[in-house]
Amino acid sequence: MPISPNQGSTAGGTVVTITGVNLAGATAVHFGTRLATITGNTPTSVTVVSPSGNGVVNVTVTTAGGTSNPLPFYYIGAPFKQSLSPTAGPSAGGQTVTINGTGLYTATGVAFGANTAVPTVVSDGQITVTAPPGTAGSVSVSVTTAGGTNNGFTYTYFDAPTLTSVTPAQGPASGGTSVTLIGTELTSTSAVTFDGNPATFTVINSNVVAAIAPAGTVGAVNVTVTTEGGSATAAGGFTYLAGPGI
């Protein structure tokens, strides 16, 4: 007498189908000592909605002919999430997010607001998931398992940045030039580089970042701004000049 699924939420409400023989006219289905609600019945199957419960219980079907042999049903508690990392990423999606907690082994879906992604189960204590695309702003993150759904975390989407101007566009190769970077979606700037070399910087607002050009090699170099939403590059945006000599 197979039972499918053989696990469900401790809160009950799982639709379970029990198959076997001589099941017509089922009068009761017990999950341990508790009665389930019968929603369908044929000579070879009984469909029920599980009651609430805990641990492992025996499931039996009772008909006019007697009570069947028992089959185990496993109650699973709702998942508990301890951490989510990273907590932000591009609105285009695609970032790998790791969720740690307990009761995650049966995870079937992770919702980022209204958008759902299928996780990879690493262990009962960890899952990873690729963030789906979203709209700039914060959304709640919930995990669904056989034990139910739990939320409590927030993930923030950022639109991709743009970099439209670098002023001044040149300075000495020894570095030290104060440069203003103009663009969009720059609030979450985490790095500014000149030809791959990191520069010190200050975020002024979503459109302006002030940076100090590091030392570099004579010639035009790329200037790149990296944010939670991605990276933007001004190709050849700054030119390093050679110092004078006499």
Image (cartoon, rainbow, N blue to C red):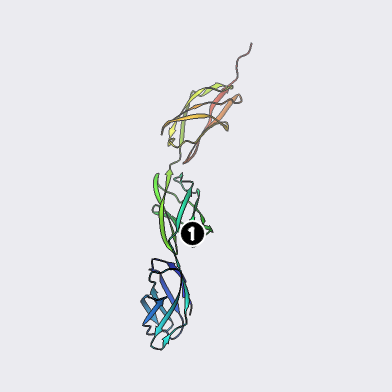
Q: Position of residue 108 (x, y in %)?
A: 47, 61
Q: Quadrant of residue 28?
A: bottom left
Q: Position of residue 62 (x, y in %)?
A: 40, 83
Of the pair 244 and 100, the residue shown nearer to us: 100
Residue 231 sits above or below residue 75 on the image? above
Look at label 1 and name its amino acid.
Leu
Q: Position of residue 66 (x, y in %)?
A: 41, 87
Q: Residues within 10 Å of mark 1 (few under 14, many from 20)?
A: many
Quadrant of the snapshot with the C terminus:
top right
Residue located at (49% from left, 29% from top)? 201
Q: Which residue appears farthest toward the top when viewing the image?
A: 246
Of the pair 232 and 10, the residue shown nearer to us: 10
Of the pair 26 and 193, the residue shown nearer to us: 26
Q: Which residue appears farthest toward the right when viewing the image?
A: 246
Q: Position of residue 233 (x, y in %)?
A: 51, 34
Q: How many marks?
A: 1
- Dot 1 corresponds to which residue? 104
Q: Is residue 217 left or right of residue 114?
A: right
Residue 147 sits above or below residue 173 on the image? below
Q: Quadrant of residue 145?
A: bottom left
Secondary structure beneath dot 1 equals loop
